[in-house]
Image: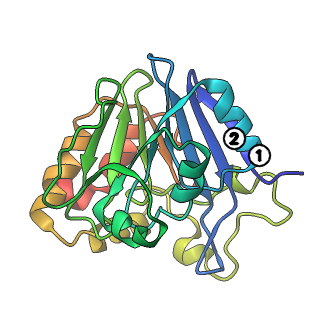
């Protein structure tokens, strides 16, 4: 039995959730997200392996046009996806591009401190904000049609229950539950984490506010459960330090 949980979260928005342990023991889960655009093309935030079940589902949606890396650390599977979809436009943050240099990938473009507002062709349906002041150089995405925010390390919603649904072991974090295992956006641990990862205060305030002003109700994080409602409220809680 596959450990990947595949779900259509809402119309034309699919998630691929899988167990993932940070540092080998922090059970934070992993997730890729695929969106079928109005053009019929598919946009994929690729953050988990391209398993046979994942590929079958993505292929059923339509031709993959965009493969996206959301920050400087979610890049492990970009080459795997691009090999399967060589005609797709591959985009990521500049630090991820540099880390993947040895793979000789064909990049369509990137976000960077000197290129913070690039355009790739999906902006009519998916908005994006590059967080130059965040340690991992994350990008936040808004699928306007479904009012869904998609993020990598900007926002967690732990424990990662869905991502361990098909796993033989649970989503708990042995010995660390009190410290990190319940890091929802409304907890002090998450707010402290968001504050500590902000290395550029002015940029963090600017970009956290830009996302807070978006109209979204749902949040799909790479780590932890999907937030199905009050997503903007969750964002404002997690980023309270930068918004107040």
Q: Residues within 10 Å of mark 1 (few under 14, many from 20)?
A: few
* Disc 1/disc 2 C-alpha distance (Å): 5 Å
Closer to the camera in the image, 124 or 237: 124
Q: Is residue 23 visible?
A: yes
Circle 1 SS class: helix
Q: Is residue 80 left or right of residue 129?
A: right
Q: How is the image coloured?
A: rainbow
Q: Is residue 79 left or right of residue 230?
A: right
Residue that mark 1 sits on: 52
At x 60% / y 56%, what residue is drawn?
80
- Identify which residue is drawn at 35% across, 35% down: 142
Mark 2 lies on residue:
55
Work out whether residue 235 or residue 202 is closer to the camera in this orientation and state it. Answer: 202
Image side of residue 154 versus residue 161, left or right: left
Q: Give the image location of residue 4, x and y in percent.
A: 74, 50
**Residue extending farthest right:** 1
* Position above or below: 57 against 185: above
Q: Quadrant of residue 217?
A: top left
CB atoms at circles 1 and 2 under 8 Å apart?
Answer: yes
Badge 2 element: helix
Q: Residue at x 38, y 65 (%)?
A: 96
Residue at 68% across / 26% down in the picture?
60
Label 2, residues with CA under 10 Å away: few <14, some 14-19, many ≥20: few
Q: Position of residue 215 (x, y in %)?
A: 30, 29
Q: Quadrant of residue 71?
A: bottom left
Residue 196 image point, x, y percent: 29, 74
The answer to whether 24 is drawn above or below residue 181 in the figure is below
């Amino acid at each position: 039995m596959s450990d990947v949980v595949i779900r259509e979260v809402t119309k034309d928005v699919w998630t691929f959730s899988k167990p993932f342990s940070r540092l080998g023991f922090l059970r934070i889960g992993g997730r890729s997200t695929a969106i079928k655009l109005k053009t019929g093309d598919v946009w994929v935030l690729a953050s988990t392996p391209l398993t046979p079940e994942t590929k079958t589902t993505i292929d059923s949606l339509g031709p993959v046009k965009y493969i996206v890396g959301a920050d400087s650390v979610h890049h492990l599977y970009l080459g795997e996806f691009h090999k399967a979809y060589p005609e797709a436009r591959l985009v990521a943050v500049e630090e991820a591009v540099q880390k993947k240099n040895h793979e000789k990938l064909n990049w369509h473009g990137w976000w960077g401190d000197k290129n913070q507002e690039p355009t790739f062709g999906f902006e009519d349906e998916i908005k994006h904000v590059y967080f130059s002041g965040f340690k991992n150089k994350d990008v936040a995405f808004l699928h306007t049609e479904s009012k869904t925010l998609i993020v990598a390390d900007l926002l967690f919603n732990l424990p990662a229950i869905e991502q361990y649904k098909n796993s033989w072991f649970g989503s708990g974090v042995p010995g660390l539950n009190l410290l990190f295992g319940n890091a929802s956006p409304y907890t002090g641990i998450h707010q402290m984490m968001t504050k500590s990862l902000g290395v550029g205060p002015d940029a963090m305030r600017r970009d956290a506010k830009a996302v807070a002003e978006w109209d979204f109700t749902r949040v799909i994080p790479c780590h932890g459960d999907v937030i199905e409602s009050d997503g903007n409220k969750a964002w404002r809680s997690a980023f309270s330090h930068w918004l107040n």
